Image: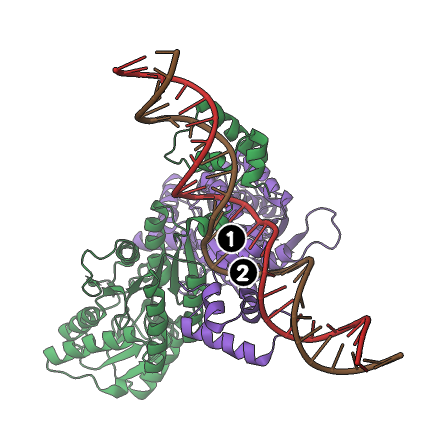
Chain colours: A purple, B green, C red, D brown
DNA sequence: CCCTCCTTGGTAAGCGCTTTCCTAGTACCG
DNA sequence: CGGTACTAGGAAAGCGCTTACCAAGGAGGG
């Protein structure tokens, strides 16, 4: 691998000069030298060693993002927005998949610290696990203390700025829609119990029930894994226990798609016999039959905001900034009034 | 940020000792010192600077992967397999999205070289653009010359080892299925013309036509973008031009889903009036109605193989190794015999 | 014509770590 | 008890780059 010194030697100048030319430093350099050096760079196919640069400059540049899984469309969207902004300011994005394992998140915070990341973006739901939250928080605080910036997407119990989607309102919109259509016996397929996303959405659903003078009994809530298979399984369990449900609210679209598949296999018509609604408005929501009524979250935008938040230091140092992102009901064909 | 020297100072030992303890070097260290150092590490929340380590060790560790877009399920699957293997051997994976812009690929090769990546995995289709191919190849060769390893997924015109999915056979399987069912007028919705993936799949389709004593006229091939919207648009164009098609083969599932949506909107029954087949067997293929007949590629496996290939130096230096991954027809409900 | 000031390029001191080589201390043998 | 052979820890030389500081030379003014 060609080094700065090699280039300097070939061009017959000092390393300092090469460095200045290659990085476009403010220091003026004679045109003749400049060309000679550039020619040497080209000849040796010189590319500066990013690690050495980082070490010498000692100012961080990369941005780390910790998600449950990038291949999940939810995080893919967020990551896309995030990458756009980061790339615009010439920063490398390091993507870390925790696969919903809390310990992995801790490891990754450490790794990003080791990588001298300028900021860590924590995307995805938090866990209801106080011990873990405390540990993570203390690790984050250490990172912050050494100048690291932190932004969190979709949870709020951590240090650092936050972009929070309005999960509670989203749940409310879904509940309001179903109760408004006249449904009375509604089953809910929630995500993992320990995720705050899950509980927030349920709280919204409950509030809608209350507003419609109904209630949502705990036995009608089944917990899944936010994936398709668990959606189908949960729907089966729900229908077996409560055969006369008229609507099922799945708390994300993947599970809703699973519900749709199960209902089809049992010959249950949607929405004529049972209405189904999802959450997140993933691309798939509009591709299934019937197209899914769901709640849209501005995911790309959320990713972009998180980076922006992380990169621009808070004007005044008073406390973390929080940006709320609103949820929106997308009405499609999978929901309708219950059969009389 | 605490440094090695800080730890050494706090523990009252030399930096060398701390380094040895922290990295678990082979050199034996007295237990008492060891504990004192570990305590200091804990107290200062010391994490070694990865860049400094890299520089000092001067041996590469990260793996770079260049894909069109990770949020595309096709690449998401590949990346997942790749990450698994890479993480097992303690390597950082740097994901680069080219968004199908050739220049971006060149930039990323440079970036990965700067990052001292141990290997570059090039995933996704190549381009039919000789100038570009030559440039990329020369950049890759420079990288290779300095000890970088290269593996390529799904194309073969480059230096380095390759994992190639059998696109041609996949196309053949699709064609064989449709012609075998009795279809005679088949429309094809291909991907971008300049991608080798597209042309390989078409070649397979043509071979199947020949084997069935038919042919596939160029006017029945429309080129899309591998995304849903272009699938729908292409299907519309195809049907307007050739109203009596009995089958449409989309060369990936996203476009097939678009086709399905368009047909539904026009009230065309699938597969009774028109059969539809896709390619890739993305998760969505089994979620749409009717579920999509398609061709499965072992994507996760391909990602994993690519890393393995890249990391283990070829036993004998004779030429790049090529691993073929077989395609498999997945028969679902979207294809059937043409209406008599 | 001399002195000063500015311009341009070079010198060298790190950035935080690893690792080779060395030294001092200990154990063991004759 | 003296000498050899290890052993455990430290000193220091880089890894490839940036940048503060310095020096030399030329221009311009008195």
Q: Residue A220 placed where, x, y %? A: 47, 40
Q: Nearer the viewer, residue C27 or A183?
A: C27
Q: Earlier in the sequence, mark 1 or mark 2?
A: 1
Question: In percent of the image, x 62 and y 50: which residue is there?
Answer: A162
Q: Would residue A328 be found to the left or right of residue A100 on screen?
A: right
Q: Chain of mark 1?
A: A
Residue B330 showing in the rendered view: no
Q: Quadrant of the C terminus of chain B?
A: bottom left
Q: Quadrant of the N terminus of chain B?
A: top right
The quadrant in which residue C16 appears is: top right
Q: What residue does disc 2 label?
A: A82
Q: Is residue B21 above or below residue B257?
A: above
Q: Would residue B244 be found to the left or right of residue B111 on screen?
A: left
Q: Residue B69 placed where, x, y %? A: 41, 65
Question: In percent of the image, x 20 and y 66: which residue is there?
Answer: B319
* Label of residue A65 in the image: 1
Q: Would residue B252 be found to the left or right of residue B180 on screen?
A: right
Q: Nearer the viewer, residue B118 or B57?
A: B57
* Label of residue A261 in the image: none
Residue A104 showing in the rendered view: yes
Q: Residue A214 placed where, x, y %? A: 57, 43
Q: Would residue A30 be found to the left or right of residue A12 on screen?
A: right
Q: Is residue A144 above or below residue D22?
A: above
SS for callout 1:
strand
Q: Chain of mark 2?
A: A
Q: Nearer the viewer, residue A204 or A18?
A: A18
The quadrant in which residue C11 appears is: bottom right
**CB contact under 8 Å: marks 1 and 2:** yes
Mark 2: few/some/many CA within 10 Å (<14, 14-19, 20+): many
């Amino acid at each position: 691998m060609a080094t700065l010194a090699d280039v300097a030697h070939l061009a017959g100048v000092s390393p300092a000069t090469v460095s200045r030319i290659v990085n476009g430093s403010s220091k003026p350099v004679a045109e003749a030298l400049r060309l000679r050096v550039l020619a040497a760079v080209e000849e040796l196919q010189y590319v500066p060693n990013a690690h050495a640069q980082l070490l010498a400059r000692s100012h961080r540049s990369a941005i780390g993002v910790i998600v449950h899984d990038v291949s999940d469309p939810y995080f893919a969207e967020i990551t896309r927005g995030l990458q756009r902004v980061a790339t615009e300011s010439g920063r490398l994005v390091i993507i870390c998949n925790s696969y919903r394992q809390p310990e992995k998140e801790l490891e990754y915070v450490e790794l990003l610290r080791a990588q001298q990341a300028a900021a860590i973006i924590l995307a995805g739901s938090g866990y209801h696990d106080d011990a873990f939250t405390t540990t993570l928080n203390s690790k984050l605080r250490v990172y912050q203390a050494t100048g690291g910036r932190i932004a969190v997407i979709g949870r709020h119990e951590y240090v650092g700025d936050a972009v929070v989607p309005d999960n509670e309102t989203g749940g409310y919109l879904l509940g309001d829609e179903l109760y408004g259509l006249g449904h009375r016996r509604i089953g809910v397929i929630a995500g993992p119990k320990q995720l705050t996303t899950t509980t927030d959405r349920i709280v919204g659903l409950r509030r809608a029930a209350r507003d419609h003078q109904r209630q949502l009994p705990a036995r009608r809530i089944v917990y899944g894994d936010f994936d398709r298979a668990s959606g189908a399984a949960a729907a089966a369990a729900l229908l077996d226990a409560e055969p006369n449900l008229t609507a099922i609210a799945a708390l994300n679209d993947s599970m809703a798609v699973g519900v749709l598949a199960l209902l089809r296999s049992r010959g249950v018509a949607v929405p004529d016999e049972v209405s189904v609604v999802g959450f997140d408005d993933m691309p798939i929501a509009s591709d299934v039959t019937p197209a899914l009524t769901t709640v849209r979250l501005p995911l790309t935008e959320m990713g972009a905001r998180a980076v922006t938040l992380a990169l621009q230091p808070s004007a005044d140092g008073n406390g973390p900034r929080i940006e709320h992102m609103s949820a929106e009901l997308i009405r499609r064909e999978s929901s309708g009034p219950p059969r009389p």
